[in-house]
Image (cartoon, rainbow, N blue to C red):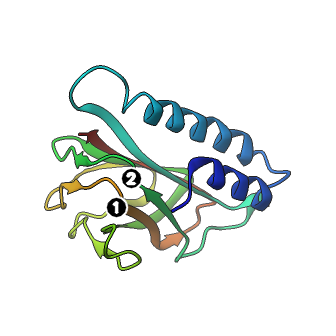
Amino acid sequence: MATLKQLLEYAEQTFAGTTAIRSLRKIIAGLQENIDAGGGGGGGPQKALIQAGFYEPQGQALVAGASVEIPLRHAITLTTTDSWQVNGDQTGSVVLDVELATAAGYPTFTNIAASAKPTLSSARRATGAMTGWTTSAAAGDTIRISINTVSTLEKVAVSIPCTVT
């Protein structure tokens, strides 16, 4: 399983020379600080976000099938009373798959979003309920967010609320 440092090194090689790498460095540094602090410090569960971003350099359109895997160092509970959020760089459409692989079952993933997948439909921003979602994942599990379908968009970001337990 890759560490955040390994992911950053891979991203720097893959996206060298793009403006996206600066943002990615900041995101990874923030994630590592949060993880090192035990999910935000203090005792008990801490609110957090599972975040993923997709972008194509030099104005190219996103394509279906692109995915990002997020290894979990701590157990989480998805905060289904909150909403997921999807932002696009322009008016467009995207449907995102959210899947989970257990540590023992990796690399086999199963859908955890039921039929309430994060979806942007001819818009720049959308939010939605996480009705029917699987609500927990253990330390060592992996969440994968992938583009099921997409049109027009060059950049997409998704946030899914959770609690680090």
Q: Pick out the residue farthest to the bottom.
A: 108
Mark 2–mark 1 Cα distance, whole angstroms, equals 6 Å
Which residue is labeled 2 in the image?
72
Residue hosting label 1 = 141
Q: Are marks 2 and 1 in contact (CB under 8 Å)?
A: yes
Q: Which mark is residue 1?
A: none
Element type at marker 2?
loop
Residue drawn at point x = 24 percent, y = 22 percent: 43
Q: Is residue 11 left or right of residue 64?
A: right
- Quadrant of res 152: bottom right
> At numbered mark 1, what does the secondary structure look like: helix, strand or loop?
loop
Residue placed at 33% from the left, 46% from the top?
A: 74
Check the image and report above or below for 51 versus 107. Answer: above
In the current view of this chain or complex, which residue is farthest to the top? 42
Callout 1: 10 Å neighbours few (<14), some, many (20+)? many
The percent position of residue 25, horizontal first and vertical second, equals: 67, 40
| Displayed quadrant of residue 23 | top right
The image shows residue 148 at horizontal and vertical percentages of 44, 74
Q: Pinpoint residue 116: horizontal percent, then vertical percent.
A: 23, 63
Horizontally, is 123 left or right of 165 in the view?
A: right
| Residue in the picture at 23% in, 40% down | 165
Amino acid type at image mark 1: Asp
- Residue at (29%, 19%) from the top-left corner? 42
Q: Position of residue 18 (x, y in %)?
A: 80, 50
The residue lying toward the viewer, choosing from 138 and 149, is 138
Q: Residue furthest right?
A: 17
Residue type (three-letter) at the residue carrying disc 2: Leu
Is residue 17 found left or right of 40 in the rendered image? right
Other-residue count near label 2 (Cα within 10 Å), few / some / many at <14 / 14–19 / ≥20: many
* Number of marks drawn: 2
Mark closer to the chain start, 2 or 1: 2
